Image: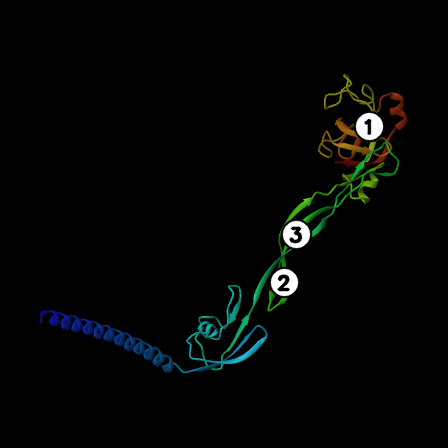
Amino acid sequence: MLRNDTKNNTRLHSAARISLMFAKVVCAVIAILLMTSVVLAGSQDRPAAKVTISVDGQTWEWVSTQKTVGSALMEAGITLNTSDRVLPGLNVNLGPGMRVKVTRIEDKVIYKKENVPFKSIVKFNPQITGRRVVQEGKAGEKEVQYVYRYKDGVKVAERVSGSKVTKQPVSQIVAVSHPSMLASRGGSYVRHLTMYASAYTPFHCGGSASGNCAMGFRAGKGVVAVDPHVIPLGTKLYVEGYGVAMAADTGGAIKRTRIDLCFDSYGEAMNYGRRTVTVWILE
């Protein structure tokens, strides 16, 4: 008798547990249905808007009850990239008759190899005649990084975002026999002056008693006296009819466009006399 009562109690407890579980499931289903009805009711409260969407070369009409442009595009299954442009903006409230335009923006990085032009250096060399190429020039090479911008697949802009020289150019070196040839070939003289030239020797015709020039070394052919305010001492020159020289001396009568040319002998100085010359100031 006691065993039968125990069995009956066990059956009653199992039935109670099943009933409790069933009640919980029913409550959960009812809660879900209530939440869904609230959402649907909220959507039904917002009037549907017919909009025109243009993207990826296609245009169509879309009816949506979404609040914003962004949520309507998401509803329509349109995936946006971070660089894409949307007009009107994603956060703009959706309205009937609105035209939504999605412009695809894409930047592509392109690498190109380009030549680096070589420089032409012209140097004065009185020991040659005319013009002589001392060293042939060779173009270098650089890698240039371009960024091409595309709108809806059409290239609209490009810019250089960086470059790197991968091969250095080799300069062309040209020697010329007269400074007048430097100007026409982009060479290395600063300017030229028209000056009135006279002549002297280290100990005569204005030379010092010691035979030294103003810069302290022995004067001779190739040393010229100048006005330091016009041509600084130490400047390399080419004097027409005289040759390469250095502005290394001064004189009391040598002012402005006067220049005094030193010769090794008194006879040479006398033979030179006085004349107007062109003086090229070299680099």
Closest to the camera, between mark 2 and mark 3, is 3
Name the residue nearer the viewer: 74 or 10: 10
Q: Which residue is mark 2?
A: 157
Q: Is residue 121 above or below residue 87?
A: above
Residue 156 placement (x, y as % from top left): 63, 65
In the rendered image, which quarter contains the N terminus?
Answer: bottom left
- Distance from disc 2 to disc 3, alpha carbons, whole Å, reads 16 Å
* Comes first in the chain, label 2 or label 3: 3
Label for residue 261? 1
Numbered circle sitting on residue 168: none
Residue type highlighted by circle 3: Val
Residue lying at 77% horizontally and 36% vertically, measured from the top left: 281
The residue type indicated by label 2 comes to Ala
Look at discs 1 and 2 and give the one toward the viewer.
2
Q: Position of residue 113 (x, y in %)?
A: 69, 51
Q: Residues within 10 Å of mark 1 (few under 14, many from 20)?
A: many
Give the residue drawn at x 14%, y 73%: 8
Q: Identify which residue, 145 or 188, lies in the foreground.
A: 145
Decide if residue 21 is on the left or right side of residue 276: left
Q: Quadrant of the C terminus?
A: top right
Q: Amino acid at mark 1?
A: Leu
Tag in front: 1 or 3: 3
The disc label shown at residue 144, or none: 3
